[in-house]
Amino acid sequence: GDSVTQMEGPVTLSEEAFLTINCTYTATGYPSLFWYVQYPGEGLQLLLKATKADDKGSNKGFEATYRKETTSFHLEKGSVQVSDSAVYFCALTDQGGSEKLVFGKGTKLTVNP
Amino acid sequence: DAGVTQSPTHLIKTRGQQVTLRCSPKSGHDTVSWYQQALGQGPQFIFQYYEEEERQRGNFPDRFSGHQFPNYSSELNVNALLLGDSALYLCASSTRRTQYFGPGTRLLVL
C-alpha cells in the first residue's frame, strides 16, 4: 500500500539556520502531497501542498517541490524562527476516489534563540 | 468563517465504556474523515463519510463506528474501550481533496 517515510527526528537548529526535512513516498499512480504542522497541544494545520509533478508548494517561507523521479517532497526553509518549533508531517492522498491521507511518523523541530 | 470544531476537548473513560466524539466541518465542506493519533505517531485513518455514508474505512475494528448527519456534522463512536484506544482523535473536513483538521479530542482510557 501507499506509504510515507520521513527523516528521523528530533531536529534542533539555531534561529536563522536553514531547514531541510526529507520526505519520500511510495504510491501507485500520482498522489497529491502535503506538509502539515502540529504545534504543541494542537491539531494539524495544512502548511503547503502540491498536486502534480514539478509543482512547488509554498507558505510562510516554507517550500517543497514534488519530485516524481525521486518520489520525494522535501520541506525547506531558508531561515527558521523560534516560532517554527513544532512537529512536521508529510502526507499523501492517492488519485482515486478516496481522500484518505497517509502520514509519515512526523519530525519534531526545535529552534533555539 | 469557523474552521473545523470538535467536542469535547478532553475525555477520561474507563475500560469497557463507550464514547462519542463530535465534529462540525468547515462551512461548505461535505466530507468528514476521522483519524487516531497515538502519542509520538502520525495520524492513522479510521474512516471517511460523504453524503451520510461511510465511503472508506481504515484498519480499525468494528468497535469504531460513525455517523454523518444531513448538515454534514459527524460523530465517532467507540465501544468497549481498551487502554490502547487512548489517543488524540482528529476530525478533518474537506473539499477538492484537501483536508482541514480540527483541534482534536484527547481521550484517556483508564
Image (cartoon, helix red, strand yellow):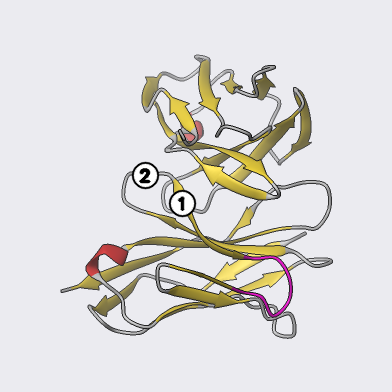
What is the three-letter code of the residue carrying label 2? Answer: Glu
Residue at left 53%, top 15%?
B18
Q: Are marks 2 and 1 in contact (CB under 8 Å)?
A: yes
Mark carried by residue A45: 1
Residue at left 60%, top 23%?
B73
Residue A109 picture quarter: bottom left
Residue A6 picture quarter: bottom right
Mark 2 against mark 1, which lies toward the viewer?
Answer: 1
Secondary structure that dominates the magenta span: loop
Residue at label 2? A42
Segment colored magenta: A50-56
Camera-side residue of B93 and A59: A59
Q: Residues within 10 Å of mark 2 (few under 14, many from 20)?
A: some
Helix, strand or loop for disc 2: loop
Residue found at the very far front of the displayed protein: B1
Q: Residues within 10 Å of mark 1 (few under 14, many from 20)?
A: some
Residue at left 76%, top 29%?
B54
* Chain under numbered label 1: A
Residue B87 picture quarter: top left
Do marks 2 and 1 share a chain?
yes
Residue B44: percent from the left, percent from the top? 59, 46
Let me know if residue A51 is in the magenta part: yes
Quadrant in the picture for the C terminus of chain A? bottom left
Mark carried by residue B3: none
Side of B56 where A113 appears, left or right: left
What is the three-letter code of the residue carrying label 1? Answer: Gln
Side of A111 where B8 appears, left or right: right
Q: Is residue B24 above or below residue A10?
A: above
* Chain under numbered label 2: A
Q: CA distance from mark 2 to mark 1?
A: 9 Å
Residue at left 74%, top 37%?
B57
Residue B36: percent from the left, percent from the top? 54, 40
